[in-house]
Structures are given as structure tokens and as C-alpha cells.
Image (cartoon, rainbow, N blue to C red):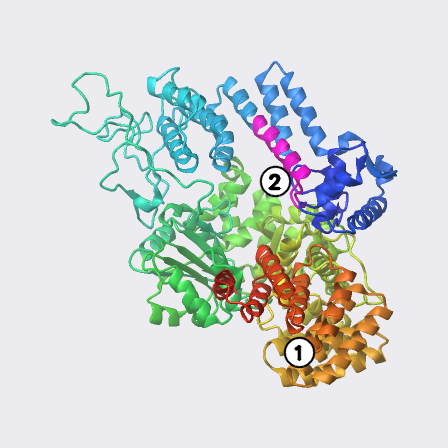
Amino acid sequence: MEFRLLGTVSVDTFTGPLPLGPAKRRSLLAALLLSANTPVSISRLTDSLWDDTPPLHARSVIQGHVSRLRALLVGADAEAYGVELVTLGDAYVLRLPETLLDSQRFEELLTLARGQRSPADAVLMLKEALSLWQGPALSGAFAGRPLQAAAHSLEESRLATVEQLARAYADLGEHNRAAAVLRAEAVAHPMRESLAAALMTALYRAGRQSEALDWFHRTRRLLADELGIDPGHELADAYALILRGGPGPDTGRNAPDGPGTAARGPVRADGSGGDGGSRGGPVGPAGSGTGPVPAARPAADRRTGPDGETTAGPDDRPADRPAEQPGGRSGGAGGAPSLAPPRPLPVPSLAGEPHPTDLLPRAPRGFQGRAAELAALTRAAAGEAPVCLVTGPAGVGKTALALQWAHRNQAAFPDGRLFADLRGFSDTGEPALIEVLREFLLALGVAPRRVPESVAAAAALFRSLTDRRRLLVVLDNARHSATVRPLLPGGTDCVTLVTSRHRLEGLIASDAARPVPLDVLEPPDSTALLAGVLGEDRVLAEPVAARRLAELCGGLPLALRVTAARLAGRPTWTLAGLADELADERSRLTFLDVDDTGVSTALRLTVQQLPQDAVHQLARLGHHPGSHFDPYTAAALAGTDPVVATAALERLAAAHLVTETGPGRWILHDLVRLYARGMDPECGPDALIGVLDHYIATALAAADTAEPGGEPCFVLPEDYHRPVAVRDFVDRPAAMHWLAAERDDLALAAVAARTAGFHDRAWRIILLQWPQVVWRVRDSWSPLLELALDSARARDDAYAESRVLNLLGWVLAEEGRTAEAAALLERSPVLARQAGDRLGEATALINLAVVQAEQGELDTALEGCGRAVELAREEQDAHTEMLALQHLARMQLTAQRPHEALESVRTALDLGPEHEEIARRVLLLTTSGEARLSLGEEDEGIRLLDLAAEEAENSGYDEGAVRALQALLRVTAEPDYLKRYEQAVRRLTEYG
């Protein structure tokens, strides 16, 4: 067990992090850990959990969080580690060995580092200390004032440790490493002068004088622009040290390119040096071998070719050289250089400025050959708005070629690089075009609410945003030309790179796409790929066998990598022996087919050598209904825990059987998926049930974090298998991000569940997405909910049908399909009553009443909403009762019964709401204010409406602000209200 404060506040156990839940509970844990083994009073915990006036029931909230935290610790067998959460009078104390707390270990390592005589030993201690940090301190907690102070103190300690590590590197003469350590922090803290001064000194002593001067000028300008001050003594002294040239730069083993070498010049896409001279010394403007290397201009001020070469602009003379005097010489002949400050260097992007978007996966490892294809891509990328089309059979390396070219030519696209896998040849199906466009638009800075809902509108916005940008768009695995066209950027300086197994001749005809066909590797490149994995010595020892092995693999990179992985882990095996084994397989000539049995043979031979846990994991991955997986998903498929699953995934990755596309996110190659599915077909139902129940558990946790306080939207199936570990969500944004990111896979899982006859899982997985449904109600949820309804009806499950009808009816009503919504919702209360689901009946009555009120049936709606209040009260469910009272009050006000509306509002507010439920409070205050106005109590009505509008504006609830301000403007012409109303409407128009 390990407690973490240096990053996200969490408790790590053998099976994964404990599901701590809401931010307030993490705040409580953080406050207790910061005073570990010392009592923490209720009042101090209150200060940590709330910034402003705490709610009246703050003590009860704290007690509830303590109770839940204690239960989590007991469930994780904390007592065995000496961990105990104890109540002492009016305080709580978390007792634990300090070795379990990362902040304490951090301090211990710092103390040890200070006592080291050897700088090398100090470096080891300091690096280990900094490795404990996994993000900003106390992340995921609500930052009350005490916690803000603690987080600031911890961050200051971390920065001081970074500076100490840089000094230790300097003591060792490793100035480049010192600069690398300092640069990241100097970018993140651009106005911390001590960091900038240390970085300047490290760069200068590493022989990188122009970079050091560049950093001084950017910091000087930032201080002047932001604070209106000049650099302090520390920064000025570092600048003076560089100008006067002493102590001199370290040109020994730590210089960038070896002894006596200055910083390397630009590198062309083909890997050759761009300085035009030898690497023995710095090259001046005339190629004389003397003088500093000019500082690079910002990307926006340079002309950059598609192959990465840069062309100097008219002002690209070395920034730290004085301008030439008449006669063509700098300064006087033979005289000292002028002491006047150099011309200011260009200011690179700072941390506070937007950075270019980059959605590219990492560059492929062990890439070999393809020089002709890379050059062909460079030629194809020249011209106006080019579309480059890489085509070839499955497994030939189209994606690897595209990514290699994209990473080599990063400098040619200063405005960013976008990437989308169109999954045109995947059995998981292609992603919706609107989802691809949404990801692109969000990456380009469009607010989520501003993303259009139709493909045509989103594509038009994408083209307009890219019109004047220099952007690379990589569209991987396209199946049809029609899929690609809406994703093409609008800028003439943008380059689009498409990969496909098809020729896409329609794209060539309509958009002048320039094809770059990709064939199998030539024998020299195939053996080079083998050597890259096995080592050149091993391949040179058996050159004939290596060439034969490459020929047997058909030059297909997938087959070559799998075969090399088998050999790499077995140094005693010979290449000739494996070549003989492959020669016995008759299917080697079909390696280039999509369903290539030669690849299947190579995969089988690889899998035979894997540990049993990895074989088991791979077989279960083949039955995954989605397109990607994480360790939690893999564990659910295999019936293990995330730790075991992660180890198995690492082994599979080493054999090139799975691919990690990002931290903790993996995919299977299409051919590997087909092979894995056939390894153990009998395990399919068990694997599917495991992953379906994993999705249910994770989505439940996400919904609980995103919308805490409500009752679960269903009871769990009788044969539900809870996963060993469930993902923990830090806060609402994290939970909503997971639901959005997993939307396609959740839909695929629901379809797979329905196809397999697991209808009780299908409708639950769909219904659990209700926080996203509510957030993006007009985002085409009806088809998915209709699938859920079919699954509910397939088993004549009245409980399930009622629950699904509730959400589907509400969505239809929000879409303006009121008559359809009413027809569905009329059945929902009856079904809930049949199933004995009283809370479900209450919710159904509320939704039905809202539709009835819109249709003019106000008396019927009032009766139904009143019945919902009674049911919720009988079930002692405050959340549902508040919801019913909120709608009842609005209907009573519409019916000209303001006294009754005020009473309903008062009852709802007495029930809560929780401090965070600002939207409900705003709606209740608005209704109360309008009721007061109806009674002629104008001053009180205006006060309540103004309070509702202010709370809505402060929380970003623009819909609530518009509603409250509209009511205000009906009774007063106050200019401030009109201005606020127009601002709120504008925000809704721009971002809603």
C-alpha cells in the first residue's frame, strides 16, 4: 500500500488505486496525510474542503467522507500495513508508517542527497526523489486554502531539488544534462529568475552560447511585459558572465557533437547534416569553420520545406553579432567587438502561449529502409494543398512509413499535426466521421459546445480553421474516398497523408491525390530490420541464413518483427534453425494476403514461446468487442487483475503482438486479432461477460463521480461479476472524458452483448452513458437507446423497459419529438409499477409530466408530479424528491399558483441541495423569484432573481443565467441586467 500526494491524491494497492471518488474525499485524505499521525480537527478539515462559507451540514458531509474512506481502507486490508483511520473526540488521525507516504520518502531522499560527498551519488539520490512526482502536488483534490498552501510548499521543494540536481550535474561537468533538467522547469515557470539564470549558465558551459543569450532575452521581455520590471541580480549576473566570456565553455565530452563541436545545424529529412561542413567545428556564415551558429528563428518567421529544410529570411543573420559597418566588416578592423547589447533574439513560444497541436502517435521504433518511398512522399508533399496517398497490402508498413515521414518533417508544420485511425479494414467498424472531426476541432481549440453536430458543418468549420495554417493531417487506414474528403483541411499550405489498402482512385480523380505505392521490403532492408532487433553481430555471423529468413518472411515487416522477437529472446537459437522451421510451412507465399496464413504461422510460432499468462491474455484479447483496451479491460477479459494484465501486455508488446498507442492504451493489429480469436474460441462467452461487467463497473464509477448524489440508474444483474479492480476517477471532467472517449467502444460492447444474447448487459451499458446523454442530448443518442429498448423487451423485463423508456423519452422530447416522447413515456410508469420499481416510477412520472405540460395538459402534469413527490418521499430518496419538487414548482407557477410554488421551492431547498449542485439551486431560486414577482413582492423577487443569475454566471451555467435575467428584464430595465443577459446569450451562441 502506498499513499500519494506528489501528483494525484491516491492510495495505490496491489490491485490498483482505491476508488476514492469525489474531489472532496480526496481533499479530506490529503489533509489527513499532510498531518499524518497527528489529529486534524473538524474545523481544519472544513477549511480544506470549502473555500467560501461551508454548508450547514458540513460536519455531516465530512463524517460521511470519513466513513467511506475508512471502509475503503478496511477493504484494502490497510490494517496489515499498520494503517488506521481513528476518531479522537472532535478530530481524526490517520495513523500509518511514514515509509508509505511519498512526500515523506521525498524528504528522506533529499536529506540523504545533501549528505553525499560524491556528486554522482547525489545525482542518484535526487533523481530517485524527483521520480516520486507524478504531476502537480495534491492533484484531484478540491484546493481549499490550507491545501493550496501545502501544494505550493511541496512545489517549491520540488523546484529547489531540480536546481540542486542541476548543480550536481554541473559538478560532474555534465552541463548538457543540467540544461536538459532545467529547461523543462524554466518553460513551466518562465518568470522564476533563478531557473532561467541556472539554465543560461548550463547552456553556456555546454558550448551553447546563442541559446543561453536567447533565454536571457525571452525572460527579460516576459518580465517587462508581465510585471514591468528589469531582470534581477542573479539573471543579470548570468548574462554578464556570458558576455565577458568566462569561465569558458566546457568543450569536453559533454559538448553536443563531441570535442570542439558547437551545436549541430539543421538536419534534412534524409538524415544528412544541414550545416554543409564537417563536424569538426562550428561553421560560420561563410563556411569558414569559425563563429557562432545563428539562433533559429521562430517557425512562423522561416520558410520551411516539406522535407524539413529551412530557408533563411532576409533578417536571419546571427542575432548575437553586431550589424556590419560600412566596408563590410563588423566593428573596427582587428578591434574588440562592440559592447552594445546584441539585437534582441526572437522569443520562442512560452509556457503560457498556445503550443502546436500534435496528435501523432510516437515514431515507429526500428524503422528500416524505405528511402525511396520517403523521398517520394517528400516530392508528393510539394505543391498546393497536396494529398499524399500511401497504398499497399496489410502488414506492409504503411502506417509506419507515414509516421516516420511525419516525425522527420516536424519543422515543416509549425501549426501542428493531426492523426486519425479511420479503421477502414478493422472488424470493429469505422468511427463516425463526426467523431473524427470533433477530435480535430477540439485539438484546434474549439470549445466542446461549439463543435457542430452535422458532418457538413463540422467539416466546413475544420476547413475554415485550417485555411491559413501549415498543418499535417494523417488519415490512417482509409477504406473509401468518400470517408477522406470531409477530413481534408482547407489551407493551401496544409499536407494530407492518407494510408489505405485500396488504391482510392476516386480520391486521385477528385482531389489530385498523389499515390505512393508501398511494396514489401527488399532483402537488404529486411535483413537490416532483423539486425536492428537482433544486433548486427548475430546477423553477420549467419548472413546466408539471415537472407533466407528474410525471404521466407516475404519481406513483410509484421512477419519479420515477430520472427526477430522470437530470436531476440533466445540467444542460443540459430537463424538457420528458425529458417528451417519456417521453411516447413507451406503458407509462406501468402504473406501479402489480408488473411495471410503465413503471418498466422509466424504468430503461432511466436505464441508457442510465450509464457502461459501472456498466451492466456492474447487469446482473451481476441474476443474484445472494442477497438482498444487498457490494463483494466485486459484484466477483465482474462479474469486477472491489472498488475498481471500489464505484465502480460508488456510481454506481448515485446513480441510485437500488441501496440501501445499512448500511455496505458493498446491495440491489436487486425491480423493478430483474427489469429488471437481463433486460439481459444470456447473462452469467448466468458471473456465477453468479463469485459461487459468491467464496462458496467467502470461506467457506474464514472457516473457516480460525474453526477454524485443520485440513486444508481439500475440494480446489477444477478450473475454480475465485479472486476478485481475498477478505474478511479479524480473528478467530473475525468469521468466525462472517459465516457466520451469510450463512447464507440461502449456501443460496440452493447452490440456484442445483444448479439451474444446478453440482453441484461446490453441495455445497462447503454443506460450508463446518461451523464454524456444529458450533456450532449442532441448528439444522436436515439438509435443506441432504441437498441437498449429492444434488449430490454427481448427478455420481457418490465424494470429494464421502464428505465430505458425514461431516458429515451426524455431524449426525444429534447429533440422536439414531443408526440413520440409522450407515447413512450406513458408506458413507463405502468411498467415500473409492475416491476415494483417505485423510484423508477417517480422518475417516469416526472418525465411524463414535463411532456404533458408542454402539450397543455397542465392539470394532469401537476397530478403526476405530485405523485412523484409522494413516491420519492416514501422511499426516503431526497435526490428524486428534490427533482420532482423542482418541476412541480415550475408547473405550479405556470398554473398561476405562486404560493404553492414557493412552498415547493422551500421544501426542496430544505432537502439540500449539495453544495456542488449549483444548477438545481439556480433553477429553484429563479422559480422562487418569479413567484415573488407574481405576488407583487417586486423587491424580493428581483433580489432572488439577481442572486440566481449571479450564481449561474459564477459557475458557468449560462442557461440558468439567461433564464433568470430574462425574468428580471420583464420587470426592470436596469442596463446592467440587459448587458449581462446579452453576454450570457452570446456565450451560449458561441460555445453552446
List x then y, in percent, for residue 72.
81, 47
Compared across the picture, whether 89 is left or right of 158 comes to right
The quadrant holding residue 76 is top right
Crowdedness of circle 2 by 10 Å Cα count: few (<14), some, many (20+)? few
Up/down of 529 relative to 333, above or below: below
Q: Which residue is mark 1?
A: 894
921 or 515, nearer to the observer: 921
Q: Quick one: 295 or 560, which is closer to the camera?
A: 295
| Quarter of image, res 518 | bottom left
**Quarter of the picture holding the N terminus:** top right
> Circle 2 sits on which residue?
135
Residue 172 sits inside the magenta stretch: no
Magenta region: 133-161
Relative vertical location of residue 616 with respect to residue 932 in this rendering, above or below: above
Q: Answer with the quarter of the image where residue 94 lies.
A: top right
Q: Secondary structure at mark 1?
A: helix
Is residue 771 shown above or below 153? below
